[in-house]
């Protein structure tokens, strides 16, 4: 099948020639991820300005400017708006909650940061093919993960690899690496398996392992499994390769005891989950008024006071428990409805996109049960928002058109599948 050319005269293949506009799109994706990751560990924004806060704001605004200019220079691509209503409602609840908790400055700033990241994603999706934007975000996540892991190698002596520059925590490093592994697995599922992609995936999978992120690894494997079961015509080489790798991995894990050591995490076992339960129980009685029970205290609330322990405060290590404190019961219901709505849209997307969307949603939403950040200014939010925007009904015809034309670098075996009646759901 010969490569086609889109209306802008560019090759639709993702790894083809890069013009100036393409470089702007990729640069904006890198900047938005850099602005979304943590630049320091164990510190949270409380409303005051410092060099890190200002630096992240500058990077995020630069990404927004590049995405906006790029979107204005090309014909706009169709994109649904239902996701923005969900986001607007959630941010509105959080700001009102911050007002009632007398945390309006800090909560409002975080809400603005989330809105800036969301606007950047919207402009990128209007300027470039859907799969290209998600792949650019994955590339940016991979680049940041490699740099952070390389500069953070000394931290591995503590038992878990964390980022050096930027100074991200192990769970966030596992997230960045896992996103790349998922996208590479998606391309393999659709019939484009390359040795270079395999090497990259193996390296980043190793990074996930040495971070010690048990939830991240479990949800990554579950996301890959969800994508794998959607293969319609599996290639013999792919099936044989997966069986061989699975057998070798199982034998190696049993022989070395690596799985048991990983699950036990140097003897800590389930102690981290026990400490999470302490903060979760405290979140049920956090509110001082009925207003805060309904609307929360704003997105800036990341730490909660705990009682009956030798420590007094603890981070909220769950996106959903965090939402209960930050946006109250109303915000949790809003986020739950949004998540179910995104899943419904992903199930109705064209087959090549459905495989990717479902894998990412399983990974991101699965992590969110024990890890924070899904509805905050984080890389997890960027990807969740992008999938939600593309999976909704207003964007679905655009996905079919892009799949049929090969735009964005969808592997060629999947293009023929997308042209069949079953591919036009």
Image (cartoon, rainbow, N blue to C red):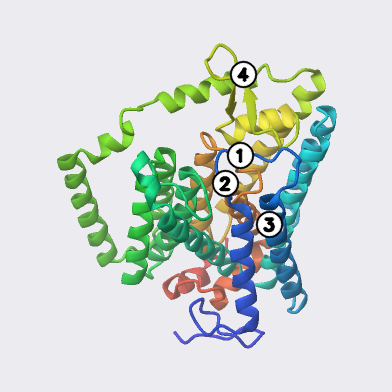
- Give the image quarter of residue 227: bottom left
Sequence-wise, the earlier of marks 4 and 2 is 2
Q: Which residue is mark 2?
A: 40
As drawn, is 258 to the left or to the right of 278? left
- Camera-nearest residue between 177 and 61: 61
Name the image quarter holding the N terminus. bottom left
SS assignment at label 4: helix
Circles 1 and 2: CB atoms closer than 8 Å: yes
Q: Earlier in the sequence, mark 1 or mark 3?
A: 1
Q: Residue at x 51, y 79 (%)?
A: 13
Q: CA distance from mark 1 to mark 4?
A: 20 Å
Circle nearer the N terminus (3, 2): 2
Question: Depth check: 189 or 379 in front?
Answer: 379
Of residues 303 and 246, which is closer to you in this image? 303
The alpha-carbon separation of the residues under discs 4 and 2 comes to: 26 Å
Residue 43: which disc?
1
Looking at marks 1 and 4 on the same chain, the residue that comes earlier in the sequence is marked by 1
Counting other residues with Cα less than 10 Å from the Cα at mark 4, is it few (<14), some (14-19), or many (20 or more)? some
In x, y percent, where is residue 87?
74, 46
Q: Is residue 100 left or right of residue 7?
A: right
Q: CA distance from mark 3 to mark 2?
A: 12 Å
- Quadrant assignment, res 213: top left
């Amino acid at each position: 099948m010969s490569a086609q050319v889109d209306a802008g005269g560019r090759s639709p293949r993702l790894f083809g020639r890069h013009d100036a506009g393409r470089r702007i799109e990729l640069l904006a994706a890198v900047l938005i991820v850099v602005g979304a990751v943590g630049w320091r560990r164990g510190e949270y924004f409380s409303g005051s300005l410092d060099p890190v806060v200002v630096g992240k704001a500058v990077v995020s605004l630069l990404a927004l400017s590049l995405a906006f200019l790029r979107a204005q220079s090309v014909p706009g691509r169709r994109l649904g708006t239902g996701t923005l209503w969900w986001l607007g409602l959630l941010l509105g609840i959080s700001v009102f909650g911050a007002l009632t908790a007398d945390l309006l400055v800090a909560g409002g700033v975080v809400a603005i940061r989330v809105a800036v990241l969301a606007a950047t994603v919207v402009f990128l999706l209007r300027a470039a093919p859907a799969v290209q934007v998600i792949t650019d975000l994955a590339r940016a996540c991979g680049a940041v993960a490699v740099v952070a892991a390389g500069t953070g190698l000394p931290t591995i002596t503590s038992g878990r690899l964390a980022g050096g520059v930027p100074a991200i925590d192990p769970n966030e490093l596992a997230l960045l690496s896992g996103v790349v592994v998922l996208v590479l697995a998606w391309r393999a599922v659709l019939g484009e398996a390359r040795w270079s992609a395999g090497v990259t995936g193996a390296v980043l999978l190793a990074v996930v392992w040495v971070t010690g992120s048990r939830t991240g690894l479990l949800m990554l494997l579950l996301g890959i499994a969800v994508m794998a079961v959607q293969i319609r015509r599996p290639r013999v080489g792919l099936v044989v390769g997966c069986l061989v790798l699975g057998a070798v991995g199982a034998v190696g894990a049993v022989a070395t005891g690596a799985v048991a050591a990983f699950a036990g995490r140097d003897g800590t076992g389930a102690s981290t989950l026990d400490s999470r339960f302490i903060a979760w129980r405290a979140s049920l009685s956090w509110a001082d008024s009925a207003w805060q029970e309904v609307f929360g205290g704003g997105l800036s609330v990341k730490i909660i006071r705990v009682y009956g322990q030798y420590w007094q405060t603890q981070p909220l290590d769950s996106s959903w428990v965090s939402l209960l404190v930050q946006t109250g019961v109303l915000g949790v219901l809003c986020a739950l409805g949004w998540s179910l709505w995104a899943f419904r849209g992903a199930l109705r997307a064209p087959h090549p996109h459905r495989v990717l969307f479902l894998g990412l949603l399983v990974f991101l939403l699965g992590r969110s049960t024990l890890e924070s950040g899904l509805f905050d200014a984080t890389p997890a939010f960027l990807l969740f928002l992008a999938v939600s925007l593309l999976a909704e009904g207003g964007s679905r015809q655009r996905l079919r058109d892009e799949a049929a034309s090969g735009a964005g670098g969808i592997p060629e075996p999947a293009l023929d599948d997308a042209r069949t009646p079953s591919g036009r759901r």
